[in-house]
């Protein structure tokens, strides 16, 4: 009977997750954000212009440049396609997994635990989603844990390389999503120092090298914002003139989002992030809650007395970041992604502690929660594959079955409970996401009108440059899959167009008819907002009632 995962099992677990991630590379992009960001990066690549960010026709003042630059450079290398768009995100998640491993080794000197922490990070459902529904979060997550690891390593051994790389990590975090990434790094390092009390090892002259690295690292982003916005005070941005891009990236982007100003207050729920973790950190969310409260009580009980082998980075970083996030007026679940490496280390350390103690009742509870989760997941897969959308990919289904065999093997293994909990969780998530990536998501994308219309436009030999659409449309898949920034115009201008092709919704076509204009229908496609699923859409019998209709018409 084994009390730890063997090296062979660890390799197989990594391999199963790799199949899940790689299968997500080939899923067509989903609207809105992933397709929108891809079309924005595509504009950079097509125009060879990396200093200006546009969302359609509008200057874009929200997410910084790093994610878009990386995606555009990848498209220059590998062509304009969804695989190329996703490659940088996948690479940064690999960096995040490696740094999660390295930080765990630095904190606990246990390589098996470090592998489990990396596996938990890679198997978190929100992280797997971020690899195919690519936004800025994958790059941010990699940059944050890269910065945290190298700064802690600098404190431990004082090498100049680590402080330089730590500063670079903080700069990349700012370039991915503003000062919030720098703040997360700072909070984690502060939590480490509050307990380790290694202040003198941190405040050495080499710290200036890290500051210099950070300043040099953020310079390209600051310069790009200065060129696009500060140099053009006559530009109308969000209804204002004279908007400073430099002020935005260094202050407004994060702090106005925190206050809800300009971005809107979308959630008054102060517990939003705490209950979001229940699905965000599937399959290990229940042990994670146990680990957080176990480690919190440990430090309270010991009055934060310094004990060899203990660290406060994970639990202190968790509580401080969660509390700060909870008071934000603007909340979305994927804001937690950059905290997942820290949570993974905390949870891995907790489970390893349970494995060394007589904690039979606790591990039995976690094991049964694992069984319950597997049962729910299997029921979902049977419904989606058997009743809702069928099985569109035979090869994909075989991969699902292969992961299922590994899951059954883990369930019936003679290992002790802790390694079984870990193996079951990883294999379950691998199986579920291989299913979603090969069977479910591809079927969903048939209901994106922009994507389906792009295929018909190519088949009919229509030039995308002859197509226009209303300027309030968010059908970014049409742009990306025609490899063209489709011209967006106000509706009153569109009503005057002649000889162009109009991509238009059925209700808006009524305006065209009411204006006395003639048209010829060239193509049509059904549409549904597939990132906001409802039971009526999933039900094959009621699905048609949930669909809207878009048309490609020729203006006569």
Image: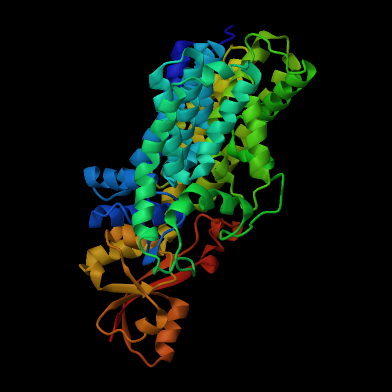
Q: Position of residue 2 (x, y in %)?
A: 57, 8
Looking at the rendered image, the quarter that the N terminus falls into is top right
Asked whether 123 or 399 is in front, the reply is 123
Relative to 185, does residue 137 appear above or below in the rendering? below
Relative to 526, does residue 154 appear above or below in the rendering? above
Asked whether 398 or 359 is in front, the reply is 359
Q: Quadrant of residue 308?
A: top right
Q: Residue furthest top?
A: 1
Asked whether 48 or 23 is in front, the reply is 48
Q: How is the image coloured?
A: rainbow
Q: Position of residue 311 (x, y in %)?
A: 62, 17
Residue in view at x 56 percent, y 57 percent: 539
Q: Residue furthest bottom?
A: 516
Q: Residue furthest right?
A: 301
Relative to 307, does residue 47 appear above or below in the rendering? below
Q: Would residue 437 be visible to someone looking at this image?
A: no
Q: Quadrant of residue 496?
A: bottom left
Q: Position of residue 552 (x, y in %)?
A: 33, 74
Residue in view at x 47 percent, y 45 percent: 177
Residue in view at x 30 percent, y 48 percent: 72
Residue in view at x 40 percent, y 37 percent: 215
Looking at the rendered image, the quarter that the C terminus falls into is bottom left
Asked whether 47 or 238 is in front, the reply is 238
């Amino acid at each position: 009977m084994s009390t730890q995962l063997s090296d062979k099992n660890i390799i197989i677990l990594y391999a199963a997750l790799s199949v899940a991630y790689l299968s997500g590379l080939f899923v067509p992009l989903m609207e809105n954000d992933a397709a929108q960001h891809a079309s924005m990066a595509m504009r950079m690549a097509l125009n060879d212009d990396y200093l200006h960010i546009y969302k359609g026709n509008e200057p874009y003042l929200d997410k910084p440049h790093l994610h878009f630059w990386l995606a555009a450079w990848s498209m220059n290398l590998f062509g304009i396609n969804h695989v190329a768009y996703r490659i940088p995100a996948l690479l940064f998640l690999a960096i995040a997994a490696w740094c999660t491993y390295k930080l765990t080794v630095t904190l606990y000197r246990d390589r098996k635990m470090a592998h489990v922490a990396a596996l938990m990070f890679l198997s978190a459902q929100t992280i797997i989603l971020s690899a195919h529904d690519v936004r800025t979060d994958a790059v941010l997550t990699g940059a944050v844990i890269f910065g945290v690891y190298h700064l802690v390593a600098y404190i431990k051994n004082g090498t100049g390389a680590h402080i330089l790389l730590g500063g670079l990590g903080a700069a990349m975090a700012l370039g991915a999503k503003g000062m919030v990434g720098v703040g997360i790094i700072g909070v984690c390092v502060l939590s480490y120092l509050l307990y380790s009390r290694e202040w003198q090892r941190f405040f050495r002259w080499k710290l200036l090298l890290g500051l210099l690295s950070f300043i040099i690292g953020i310079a390209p982003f600051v310069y790009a914002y200065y060129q696009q916005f500060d140099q053009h005070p006559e530009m109308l941005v969000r209804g204002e003139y004279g908007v400073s891009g430099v002020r935005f990236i260094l202050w407004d982007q994060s702090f106005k989002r925190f206050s809800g100003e300009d971005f809107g207050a979308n959630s008054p729920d102060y517990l939003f992030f705490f209950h979001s973790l229940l699905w965000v950190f599937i399959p290990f969310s229940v042990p994670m809650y146990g680990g957080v409260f176990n480690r919190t009580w440990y430090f309270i009980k010991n009055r934060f007395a310094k004990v060899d082998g203990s660290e406060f980075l994970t639990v202190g970083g968790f509580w401080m970041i969660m509390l700060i996030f909870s008071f934000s007026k603007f909340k979305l679940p994927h804001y937690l992604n950059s905290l997942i490496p820290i949570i993974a280390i905390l949870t891995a350390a907790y489970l390893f502690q349970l494995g060394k103690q007589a904690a039979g009742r606790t591990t039995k509870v976690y094991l049964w929660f694992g069984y319950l989760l597997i049962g729910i997941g299997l029921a979902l897969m049977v419904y989606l594959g058997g009743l809702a959308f069928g099985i569109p990919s035979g090869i994909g289904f075989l991969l699902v079955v292969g992961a299922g065999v590994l899951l059954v093997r883990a369930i019936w293994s003679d290992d002790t409970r802790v390694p079984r909990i870990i193996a079951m969780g990883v294999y379950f998530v691998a199986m579920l996401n291989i299913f979603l990536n090969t069977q479910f998501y591809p079927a969903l994308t048939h209901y994106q009108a922009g994507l389906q219309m792009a295929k018909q436009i190519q088949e009919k030999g229509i030039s995308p440059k002859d197509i226009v659409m209303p300027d309030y449309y968010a059908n970014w898949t049409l742009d990306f899959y025609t490899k063209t920034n489709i011209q967006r115009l106000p509706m009153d201008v569109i009503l005057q167009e002649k000889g162009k092709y109009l991509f238009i919704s059925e209700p808006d076509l009524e305006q065209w008819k009411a204006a006395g204009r003639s048209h010829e229908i060239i193509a049509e496609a059904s549409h549904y907002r597939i990132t906001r699923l409802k039971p009526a859409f999933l039900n094959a019998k009621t699905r048609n009632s949930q669909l809207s209709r878009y048309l490609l018409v020729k203006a006569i």
